[in-house]
Image: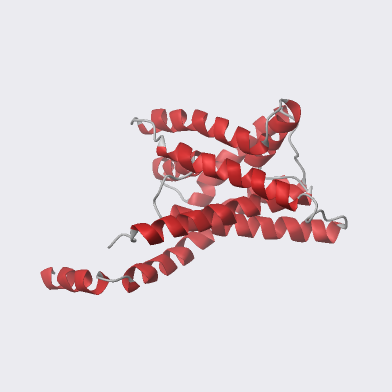
Amino acid sequence: MMPLSRVNQYLIYAIGILILTLGITLTIQSELGSSPFDALLVGLSLNVGLTVGSWEIIIALVMIFFNSLLQKQKPEYLGLVTALITGFCIDFWLLLLRTWVAPDLLFFKFLCFGCGLIVAGIGTALYLQTNFAPIPIDRLTLSLKKITRTNIFFARTLINIVFLFMAFIFNGPIGIGTALSVCFSGAILNVFMPCIGKMIEKLRSSEPGSNEVNGNHSARQ
């Protein structure tokens, strides 16, 4: 299977991160409770200091070393690049949407949260398909999926439970949205990964030179 061209890889990667962080921001702005990881970030920001994006970067650095121990290999420092971009984008969206997206009615809060959950799942699936520097928490999800020989839903749910406990300790915004995130974020990612994977595969096949490579590959078979 031919890899994406560098231009398309970086473009899809950037779009994925922008969509992911927009989804994260929408769930935070809903005030129904964020995902366990994001609730931890907000809790640390409110009770310790620094911005939500800054804590994204700090915790990502810790998780890079944890992933390294888990996989018994060198730390994947490239993942810190993704964490830096993600942290910056989260702070950007929070600043931009702070006054624009502030639902008051319960219906609109749920609508905001639901949209955020789906948008974040799409963004995550998009940038993961590029195989370029996953966010450490997503790398951990993929590692646990492989180690436990299960699926993304199980791995992500297990991680969410751990971060839920940590978010509780730091008084993060835990609510019904947090429970919904624990129950459905892994399932949403599990749905979008193969769908977006097919879209990426079509993009690969449409790139210049792909037909020639596929033809050579078929001839060797």
Q: Is residue 80 above or below residue 191?
A: above
Quadrant that contains the C terminus: bottom left
Q: In the rendered view, does 208 fall on the left or right side of 200?
A: left
Q: Residue 9: x and y, percent?
A: 39, 57
- The residue lying at 43 percent from left, 33 percent from top is 67
For the N terminus, the image quarter is bottom left
What residue appears at the point 38 percent right and 31 percent down from the top-left corner?
Answer: 75
Q: Where is residue 22 drawn, in percent x and y?
A: 64, 54
Image quarter for residue 58? top right
Residue furthest out toward the right: 105
Q: Of 21 and 88, which appears nearest the observer?
A: 88
Residue 34: percent from left, percent from top: 70, 45
Q: Does residue 125 appear anywhere in the picture?
A: no
Answer above or below: position of 104 versus 145: below
Q: Is residue 49 visible?
A: yes
Residue shown at 34%/30% (left/top)? 74
**Residue that appears at 48% across and 59% down:** 193
Q: Seen from this angle, which residue lies furthest top?
A: 48
Q: Is residue 87 left or right of residue 140?
A: right
Horizontal side, residue 103 vs residue 138: left or right: right
Q: Residue 73: x percent and y percent? A: 33, 31
